Image (cartoon, helix red, strand yellow):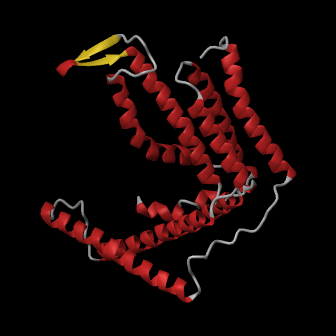
Amino acid sequence: MIEELFYIEKTAYRVSFIHNLDARVKILGMFAVIIAMVAVPYSPLVFSVGILFLGFIGLLWALSGLPWPVYAKRLGMVLPFGLFIIIFQIFFTNRYYSVFHVIADLPFGIHIYAESVEFAVILFLKCVVCVSAIILLSSTTKLHDMLEGAGRMGLPAEFALTFGMMIRYLFVFGYIYRKINESLITRCFDPFNPALSYRYRMKQIGYTVGTIFVRSYEQGERVYTSMLCRGYGKDSHIFVAKKPLRPAEWSFLAFCLLFVIVVPVAVWLNAGGLF
């Protein structure tokens, strides 16, 4: 899992129309999709809006030229964190429905409600759309470009510096992990080897995790000392040069925002103006 950290930006270095867009355009466009999807009230109309938004994101993904397995893999890595909470919704009532119908009775007085199942599916669709927008943004935008784009949009210099350091130290942590893992492999240690006692394997894994954090901390201290020697202080910040958007980027941003606004309104009007 940590080894994937070194390849997290591999797809962002490709060349396509979507990759070449300014980071601000992609940040605003994808966050507009997320805000619009979250803002749509919990009702069956979410299905129409969600499918159209997914189609839009799929079109942008196709324009980026990225392989679909990359999207499926990243979506599969993120969804389980929210899927557990979504599944539990089918056992509880919620404030979005006034009447609930039991479709299954389980032991210990637990019931599954039809309205709660519908609510869980709607919540799942909202989650998929929002996560897909983030995957598209992260897969086509370099982390440094994303940081600069946020800075140009008014992100405070303190936050930009903090996020920049966080990105840097993520890779430091991954580098330390790789060195320790290579040392364990050299010594023929396999944590999944059943020939070794379970207690011994857990003890070695505990030592390894502790060593990773200690070495990462020591490396961080060395880097911080080097930064101080080079003039780092409380008034330091990341320099972000001004960069005007091109006409094509303005047009694409306008299209994205227009699409995000028109789709929910059109679905709402088509349903009779009632959510």
* Quadrant housing residue 257: top right
The location of residue 160, given as percent across then percent down, is 60, 64
* Residue 176 against residue 83 in the figure, above or below: below
84 horizontally vs 121: left or right: left
Name the spot of residue 193 as percent of width and height, x first: 21, 61
Residue at 21 percent across and 69 percent down: it is 204
Query: In the orientation shown, which residue stands out farthest toward the front?
Result: 234
| Closest to the observer, 190 or 213 | 213
Residue 151, percent from left and from top: 67, 61
Q: Quadrant of residue 105?
A: top left
Q: Identify the residue at horizontal 56%, vertical 80% (top origin).
A: 233
Answer whether residue 65 is visible to the viewer in this image: no
With respect to residue 137, does 176 lie above or below?
below
Relative vertical location of residue 178 with respect to residue 221 in this rendering, above or below: above
Q: Residue furthest bottom?
A: 229
Res 126 seen here: yes
Q: Nearer the viewer, residue 125 or 260?
A: 260
Q: Which percent across, then down, holds residue 99?
A: 40, 10
Which residue is depicted at the point 59% across and 31% down? 39
Q: Quadrant of the N terminus?
A: bottom left
**207 vs 223: above or below:** above
